């Protein structure tokens, strides 16, 4: 009888083996889907709060009140259903924050010149810690870039300022 060697392939493991990074799923700490929910004492009152921390992030993305347990002293234990709801809420908070940040850093106005050309002027702010700046770009109705200049990050884009920039030959705005 011939004996065959069994080599373990990468990614295979014994069913009874615990993965090195086993997820915690306990009454006060629950991990999964790239998140950790941690029930903490609420500093504002006698109650409890839950902090949702995205994997790899130092700070919670969301901290909210958490329900008391039946004994009115200890927190209600985390469970899979509550965790899924918390993950959904935390993801929504992050999505809204990213949308607000994008809206603050990307602005656009549409100007119609005296000749009847429709020009979109965009302002994109680069919030660099050492050297923040903005880029002012003019694009025609076919998507062709007409001009692009670097300007101050606090440049106020409006139909008036865009029109002035276009009529000024796309020169760098004054004070920029």
Image (tube, grey):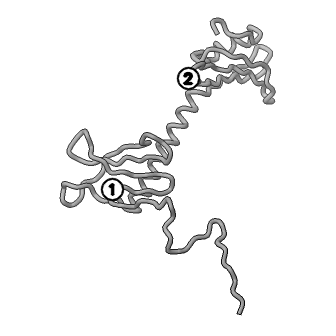
Quick one: 21 or 45, which is closer to the camera? 21
Look at the numbered disc 1 and give the secondary structure of its residue.
Answer: loop
* Residue 72 quadrant: bottom left
Q: Residues within 10 Å of mark 2 (few under 14, many from 20)?
A: few
User: Could you say which is closer to the camera, residue 114 or residue 94?
Assistant: 94
Residue at 28% x, 53% y: name it: 67
Residue at position x 22%, y 41% in the image:
45
Q: Count the labels in the image.
A: 2
Which quarter shows the N terminus? bottom right
Q: Residue 119: horizontal and vertical position, in percent?
A: 74, 22
Residue 167 percent location from the top left of the image: 74, 9
The residue lying at 75 percent from left, 12 percent from top is 170
Residue 49's place in the image compared with 145, above or below, is: below
Quadrant containing the C terminus in the rendered view: top right
Q: Residue at x 41, y 62 (%)?
A: 80
Looking at the image, do the residues carrying marks 2 and 1 touch, with CB atoms under 8 Å apart? no
Tell me where residue 166 appears, x and y as whole percent.
Answer: 74, 13
As drawn, the residue found furthest toward the top would be: 174
Give whichever of discs 2 and 1 has the lower sequence position. Answer: 1
Seen in the image, is 109 located left or right of residue 170? left
Label 2's element?
loop
Q: Which mark is residue 129?
A: 2
Direction from residue 122 to residue 66 in the image, left or right = left
The answer to which of 100 and 162 lies nearer the viewer is 100
Relative vertical location of residue 21 with respect to residue 151 in this rendering, above or below: below
- Name the residue carrying label 1: 28
Residue 25 vertical placement versus 87 (above, below)? below
Q: Does 102 appear above or below 111?
A: below
The picture places residue 76, in percent across and down from the top left corner, at 28, 58
Q: Nearer the viewer, residue 111 or 124?
A: 124
Figure quadrant of residue 138: top right
């Amino acid at each position: 009888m011939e004996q065959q060697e069994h080599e373990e392939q990468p990614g295979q493991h014994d069913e009874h083996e615990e993965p090195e990074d086993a997820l915690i799923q306990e009454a006060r700490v629950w991990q999964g889907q790239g998140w950790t929910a941690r029930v903490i004492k609420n500093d504002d009152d006698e109650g409890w709060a839950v902090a949702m921390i995205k994997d790899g992030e130092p700070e919670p993305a969301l901290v909210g009140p958490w329900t008391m347990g039946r004994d009115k002293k200890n927190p209600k234990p985390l469970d899979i259903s509550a965790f899924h709801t918390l993950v959904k809420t935390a993801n929504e908070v992050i999505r809204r924050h990213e949308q607000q940040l994008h809206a603050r850093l990307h602005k656009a106005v549409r100007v119609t010149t005296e000749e009847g050309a429709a020009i979109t002027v965009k302002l994109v702010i680069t919030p660099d810690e050492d050297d923040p700046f903005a880029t002012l770009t003019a694009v025609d109705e076919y998507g062709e870039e007409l001009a692009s200049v670097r300007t101050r990050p606090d440049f106020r884009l409006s139909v008036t300022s865009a029109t002035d920039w276009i009529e000024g030959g796309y020169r760098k705005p004054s004070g920029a």
